[in-house]
Each structure stands twice: as C-alpha cells, then as structure tokens.
Image (cartoon, coloured by chain):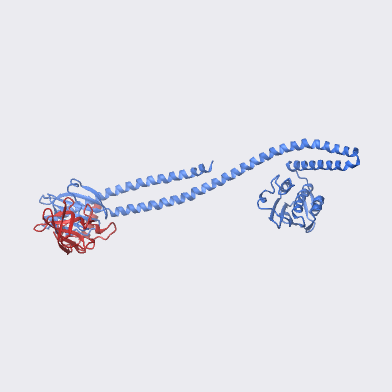
Chain colours: A red, B blue
Amino acid sequence: MRTDMRLLLAVLLTLSIQPVSGQNRQNFYNVDAELKVSGAIEEIIMESRYAGSSPFLIVILKDKQTEQKYFIEIGPAWFFEYDAHKGEILTVVGSLRRPMGELPLLIARKVTFRGETLVMRDKYGFPSWRGGRGRGRGWRRGRRG
Amino acid sequence: MKRTRLLLFFVLPFLGVVLIFLVLSSLDRRYNRLRIEELVGEQLHATAEILSVNISHLLSEKVSAEDIFALYAGEENIYYTALLDEKKEILAWISQFEGYLPLSLHSDSGKEAWIIESPAGRIYNVFTSFRDAEGRQYFLYLGYSLKSLEDMVRHSRNSFWVILGLILITGMFVFGGFYQLQKRYLDKEEEAEEQKKQKERFREISAFTSGVAHEIKNPLNSLSLLFELLRKQVPLDLKEDIALGKKEVRKIAGIIDQFSASLKPISLQRERIRLREIVSEAWESLPAVRQDNPVSLEVEIKGALVLLADRRLLVQALSNLLQNALEATGEGEIRLSAKAGKGGTTIWVRDSGTGISAQAAPRIFDPFYSGKKQGMGIGLYLTKKIIEAHGGEISFTSQPGRGTCFRIMIPGE
C-alpha cells in the first residue's frame, strides 16, 4: 500500500514538473538573521522582485549608526501605503542577506515610517500582502541577490 | 410528578445524549486529525525520499541545484522546498510565497518534522538528509500544505454541526412529544383525582344532609300536627295566622324533601308514556309560578310521541325546566317542541327570557348553584341527573338578554 502511494506520488511529481528559471538562493526571508536598521532614505527604486508579482518598493538606506548602506526590499508598492521621499527616516526590522559583491540586502518584516509601523511579513517571513487562506498562490522566485 | 420534575425527566436524558455525542464527536475528530497528520507525515517523508533519490541522481549528473529545483516547481501542496549542503547553506529553494522559507536552523535544528501555523494554513515541515553518489551530504527541506486536511476537518466540523442540529431538532420534537403526552396524561390524572375528591366530598355532604333532613322532618311533622290542632282551638281571628304558620312549616318540609330527593340515587320505573301528557302534567304542576309570571306555553309535538320513561321523574325534570323558563321570561312565551329521531326523542324548551350569563353557564348544572335570589340550586342539577339516569343528555344554548334553549335527548327503546 505504502509502495503504491510512493509510486503514485512519484508519478504526480513527475507530471507536475514545470520548467522555471533558476532561484536565487539569497532572496528568501531567513528567520535566523534578523537585523534592525534605521536611517535616511538615499534612493527609491521600484522593481519586479518575484516572477508574477507587482513592482516592489526598494530603498537604499544608510544606517545612521554604522554608516552602512543597505538595499532594502520593503514589499509591493501598492501594499506600502506611503509616498516615501529621499531623506526621510525609515526604521526597518528584517532579514539580512549578503549577496556577493553588492550591498547587503535586508528583506523587511516591520517598517516604521512617519511614526507608524507596518507589518510587511509575519515572524516566519510570510508576506502580509498575500492575505490569509484561500488567496491565490503561484510560484515565486527571487530575481536579485 | 411535578411539572419541573417531569420536564427534567425528559430534558436531562436528552441533554445527556447530546453531551455524549459532543464528547465522542470531539474525541473522534481529534483522533482523526492526529491520524491524518501522521499519515501526511509518512507520505511526506516518502515524497522527500523520492525527491532525495532524484536530486541525488541529478546532482551526480552535474545539474546545478537551482536548475534541479526549477524542475520541481508546480506541486500545489508543497509550499516551499530547499536544498542545503553539508554545512546547511541553502543551495537552492522555491516557494509559492515571495521569499517565504520559514526554516530556522537555530530552533528547528535536529527536528525531522514539525508543523507551523501560517496565514495560508498549517504547514507540515520535513527536514531530511541524503548523500549523492560521491558521498556528499545534502539536506532537503519541504513544507507541505495541510490545507486538504483542514478542508476535511472543516467539512467534518460542518457535518458535526449539521448532525448536532438534526439531533437537537429531532430531540426537541420527540422529547417534546413525550413531554406533551405525559403532561396530558398527568392533567387527566389530576382531573380524575379532583373529581374523585369532589365525589367523596359530595358523598360526605349527602350523608350529613340526609341525616339532618331526617332529624328535622320528624319535629316538623309534629309541628304541622300541632298547628292543625291549634287551628281548631284558637279564636277565629287567629286561625289565619296559624294557617300561615302551618304553610311555612310545610314549605320547610318541602325544601327538605327536595334536598333529600337530590341526594338519593335515582331508580327508574319505566313505562310507556305520551310526551304530551307529561308536558301537560309538568305545566299544571306550576300554578303558583304561572300566576306570578303571565307567560303562555306553546307546545309543538308532532304526532303521538311515546317515550319509555319514569313518568314521575320526567314530569319533575320538565317541570324544573318550565319553572326556570317562566321565572326567566316574566312576560312572553315559552315554546316546547319535540321530535322523534333515529337515536331517540329530542325535546327543546325555549324561552325569551334574560338568558344565562357566560360566568354562570359552566355551573348551572352544579348542585346548590343558583343564579336566582330565592333558588336553592337543585332544580337543574336534579333535571340533569334524571335525564342522565334515562341514558339521555341535556345541553343548552343561551344569549344573555335574548333567551335560553334547553335541549333534552332521551334515547329510544
């Protein structure tokens, strides 16, 4: 019975295989590498981060304590309700990734901006904009490390 | 059994059944959930094993980890998958949610399987290791959606509520029906008990009244004789007063006779009698009342209607009805009509008098109940007793201010 189930699963998996392009290994929310940074926005970028997703709001922020610059992935632009500008102060709690040869990437979980805090992801990194049960899902893959 | 106890007698077992159902159902659902989780775990481990073999093979073929994972996207129930090297560095991963890969090498380290809650539902996580053909160690991390399980649990919960609802509704009807039946039975029992008490009380009153009547009658007879003797000896101017005294004594004796008659069980002496004769006799027996109430009697009896009845008692019954009609009418007309039918003879006595009030209606056949100032409340009681002794029935309709109609039915031979 169990062998039959395994065979069935193997067949199902084989049938379900769909070709997608390579997944960047750095672009996931690592719950073991959380960091808090705070500083002024130096640059605002809108770009597509995951296949099939709407453009994400990206900011380059200089931490006021360490002077380190971070490439911060905030979330879909539509989900971030504010119109941010250069020079505005942003505090971000997120997961730190260190892509080779680029600015450290911080995937935001909580963003404090203009005195309000937005929860972008839950403590395991589940994106808040994906809502709860029954929302549409699709395969996502990172684009930038 | 009191009403509250009766209610509890039916409600408590029902609530007990519902409670047992709730507990058993809850235990059953919990058991099923755990069992299904266990089965899902087993299947997921099996899946991880198959994937490990496939990935190991592809790695041996020098296919990059990212390209391998690109091949494995698409399984709806697998929310995320990651391949880690021997240092547990992530080589490749895929996820259905942007950047969502909830693996913590600090807190989840050493675990092979665990479940996490997410806004997308519960996720079963498996972390297994395998080696490729060259002996290098890898780790495979899988997150499997328990949505199907949750759908089953939700479906089971919905079924549970539907079944519980059905049980409650059915129980309400069944136990409600039992309760109503039992209540009706108890009501009748109470009614019978009440009637029994009333009969007992009436029997006691009867015995007492018969005794009193007997004791009074003897001195009254003596008193009557004394008045008779006195009347002969007193001067002429006192004779009238003595006669009045004697009349009052006779009146008292008459009342006592009526009381005694009402208390005695009726024994019938049936004979074939013409109804017209009975009516005439009853009417003639009321000279004093007729004198006070100038009312005419119209009799409508088709043919020579003959009854098998006790003449004396039937005269008394009709006489009582006619007397009541006379007293209620004052002026006008009383109609007595009769008709023979299949079941027997029906007699109607209609008057155009004051009628019977709604309050008095239920009690007019009760002994010692009277709506009149001078009545003793025995006439209608006796009439009913007489008619029922003949196997018949008596009823009435009345409109206050417009008159009353009594209906007597006496079964045929």
Q: Quadrant of residue A19?
A: bottom left
Q: Which of B40/A15 is in front?
A: B40
Residue B283 in sight: no
Q: Quadrant of the N terminus of chain B?
A: top right
Total labels drawn:
0
Residue A68 percent location from the top left of the image: 11, 55
Residue B326 in sight: yes
Q: Which of A92/B218 is in front?
A: A92
Residue A73 percent location from the top left of the image: 17, 59
Residue B162 percent location from the top left of the image: 40, 53
Q: Is residue B173 left or right of residue B245?
A: left
Task: Point out the residue furthest to the left here.
Answer: A101
Q: Which of B171/B327 is in front?
A: B327
Q: Quadrant of residue B303?
A: bottom right
Q: Is residue A78 left or right of residue B370?
A: left
Residue A66 percent location from the top left of the image: 11, 53
Q: Is residue B362 left or right of residue B99?
A: right
What residue is at 70 percent from the left and 51 percent from the top?
B394
